[in-house]
Image: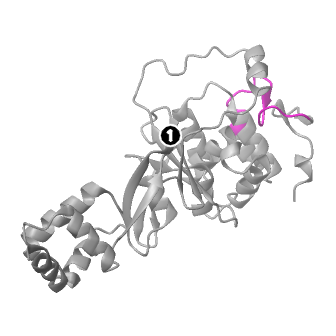
Amino acid sequence: MGRPSRFQAMESLKGPIASLVKEEKKNVFLLADIRRLLTKGNYLLGLPGRVTIKEFIEFLDAKKILHEIAVTLPLEKKVARYQTANANAFELALSLKGNSYLSHYSAVFLHGLTDNLPKTIYANTELKMTRNMNSLKLEQDSIDTAFNRNIRQSNQIARYEDLEIFLLNSKNVDHAGVKEFDLNGVKLQVTDIERTLIDITVRPNYAGGVYEVLNAYIAAKNKVSVNRLVATLKKLDYTYPYHQAIGFYMEKAGYDEKVLRLLENLEIKYKFYLTYKMQLKEYSKRWKLFYPRGLDLID
């Protein structure tokens, strides 16, 4: 007889329980969040202490306050998440690893730099700080060898229904260029436009390829601060001269000449590549950069 009375107690408090959930100002919850909500319900609403976490979850699901879903992580491990009817894929992605932020094509979309609706989400987590992270000695032969290989791509992919979530890792840069982004009243951590343009230049495969990257540069032309981009690039401290690729994209996108000179002032010493393992390529003398043949033809 105990179980019906506990459910009746929750039923009588359905409205206040729903309000507790709403006060969290998020739409995706972990099991730890549900435990905390139950504790708040005990103290603030007078929920019986005998209500178990399993009973509480069943009630939330039955009353359509939260819906339990299963996300498949790498190595086929499954984790539960509890979401409201207003939940979106970006919130779900950020719930999978602590202190992560949206990047690459996800950030391109959120900043309005593409009209495409991506079915793949990119969430990045920075690794622990280590010493001498940038230890590669740069030589032309090493650049040529690296960019004649296939581009690296993460195999750390989570899946929910037809959604893929790339769980990326990067070196620790203390969240340089990461800002709070408001999406329909929900706060998300997202790379800003400047950091986003850098990220997709470094890994164009996480943004639909070099043509999509160029389109993003075109769309960002009146939104981006090149001074801020250069400052962020210095903080990221890449070994490879990605400023040459950035300058090339900006030139092709029609950026002002004084903007281009900011990138040229960073020194152009080595021959570089726009992307990896190009079969047919052209060469930009200004940027000392190889790029795919046909990129000039983009509108």
- Residue 36 lies, with reference to residue 199, above or below; the image says below
**Where is residue 214 drawn, in percent x and y?**
76, 51
Q: Quadrant of residue 202?
A: top right
- Residue 257 lies, with reference to residue 71, above or below; the image says above
**Tag 1 residue:** 75
Nearest to the observer: residue 236 or residue 117:
117
Classified by dominant secondary structure, the portion drawn in magenta counts as: loop
Q: Is residue 250 visible?
A: yes
Nearest to the observer: residue 276 or residue 298:
276
Q: Badge 1: how crowded within 10 Å, few (<14), some, or many (20+)?
A: few
Say which amino acid is labelled 1: Leu
**Where is residue 178 drawn, in percent x and y?**
47, 49
- Residue 170 lies, with reference to residue 194, above or below; the image says above
**Where is residue 253 drawn, in percent x and y?**
79, 53
Task: Indicate left or right for 266 with 271 as reference.
Answer: left
Nearest to the observer: residue 128 or residue 219:
128
At a point 25% along the width and 62% down the height, the residue shown is 34
Task: Indicate left or right for 91 with 24 as reference.
Answer: right
Tell whether position 19 is magenta: no
Coloring scheme used:
one colour
At a point 42% along the width and 75% down the height, the residue shown is 85
- Screen quadrant of the C terminus: bottom right
Task: Indicate left or right for 89 with 254 as reference.
Answer: left
Nearest to the observer: residue 260 or residue 299:
299
Q: Is residue 176 visible?
A: no
Q: Quadrant of residue 91?
A: bottom left
Element under disc 1 = helix
At a point 43% along the width and 19% down the height, the residue shown is 131
- Screen quadrant of the N terminus: bottom left
Q: Which residues are magenta?
A: 263-279
**Where is residue 237 drawn, in percent x and y?**
55, 29
